[in-house]
Amino acid sequence: MRVSQEGLDQAQLLHAQFLERKPGGIRALLAYSDCSGLDFAGCDLSDADLTAARLRRANLSAALLRGVSASLCDLRQAMLDGADLSRADMRGSCFRGAEMNKSVLVGADVSEATVMLHEARQMEILRSFREALGGDGSDIGGEAMPLPQGTTLSLRADFTDAAMRQANLTGADLRRANFTGTILEGANLAKAKLNHATFHSAVLTGANLHGADLEGADVSDAILDPEALELAELKRATRTDYAARSETDVTAAVREHERWLDSQGQKGARALLAKADLSDRQLARARLVMALMPGARLHRANLQRALLAMADLTSADLRHALMIEADLRGATLRRACFNHANLSGAKLGPLMDVGVHHTDFPANCERAKFVGATLVGANLRRANLTGCDFSGADLTGAQLQEAKLDGSTFAGAKLTDANFDGASLKRVRDLPKKR
């Protein structure tokens, strides 16, 4: 059932009377309703029934949702900044791409839900969770699949690529939740149940993990503070085992890679540096074209004028890296973390006219993080920048013509003389109309 904004406003009014125990008050019963895109900002729907409601892209900023029944709720790309979801039942709900900064989920149940499909509407909900959101390409739902009646499914809560800076999840039940690519900077996860949760490529710097149960959790490629790695809470989690490389080994790998390039693969060896710890390495002007470096740790590395065209740096940690005039044309940088890196004059446009088929390869920076990064004069033409976070970044004079920026964030970014001609800007956040 589709709910109008007027219908929602009336339901809120009656629910307010219900909460105040006034005559005529009626509890808001919005289960299985479609409230996509509606404005709930600042409302008080505590103890309402939102079971399996569709709230895609709804504005629930600063809403009071304490104790709501909202299992199997579709909250993809919803605005939940500052929302209070304390003690809410949100088992199996989907928060992909949602904005949940400073939200409160203290004591909430956001664990796995077991569903037996016996109604058409339940099948529709689960199919919906598996389809792409459409329109801006920023959702990463899986492919739709047949769901025969009577099927029993376990549905994990999904926070993939949500922004949850300084969120309070103290004591929340988040067992088996998916936090892939989630920004949890400064979040409070104290005493939370995180058994078998997934944190691939999540940002957990400054997060409080004291007393959290992380048994069986997977924090592979997650960005963690060095001191957090020593916590007893992480001892039973699956972590990335970064391969320590000596200066001699790194120099030899680069040299053999250059031989491989010069001989078109006949001599030397391609650089295979997946999950290698290359922090603080001096790799200025290194020729690492087509190198395989997914999940590598390059924190504070010097990559000034390095040649990294067509390299695979998926989920790499490039925080504070020096990458002035680095060549990253056609590189795979999906979910890489460039926070506070210096990419002034870097080349992230397409590698043109490659091979016998004369193919162009745009750089793929989907869901990469550029918080506080310097991109002055950088070339980002035609790059896939879907869902990127440019908060506080300096993009002065950057070239973003025909780039795909759907769902990206520019809060506090410097955009003087940045060129967005022909760029795709669907659902871009905090981008001023006059630049």
Image (cartoon, grey):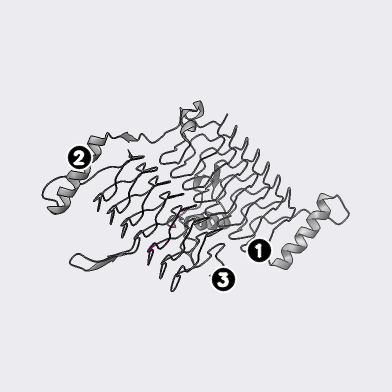
**What residue lies at 41% left-to-right and 70% top-to-bottom?**
401
* Residue 94 shown left or right of residue 318 in the figure: right
What is the span of residues highlighted in magenta in the rendered image?
A: 372-383
The residue to which callout 2 is attached is: 252
Of mark 2 and mark 3, the one earlier in the sequence is 2
Give the Cα separation between the discs numbered 3 and 1. 23 Å
* Residue 363 shown left or right of residue 155 in the figure: left
Extreme residue in the right direction? 23
Q: Vertically, is 345 above or below 87?
A: below
Q: Residues within 10 Å of mark 3 (few under 14, many from 20)?
A: few
Q: Which mark is residue 38?
A: 1
Q: Quadrant of the N terminus?
A: bottom right
Expressed as whole percent of the image width and height from the top left, the position of residue 224 reads 47, 38
Expressed as whole percent of the image width and height from the top left, the position of residue 352 reads 26, 67
The residue to which callout 3 is attached is: 433
Q: Vertically, is 398 above or below 297?
A: below
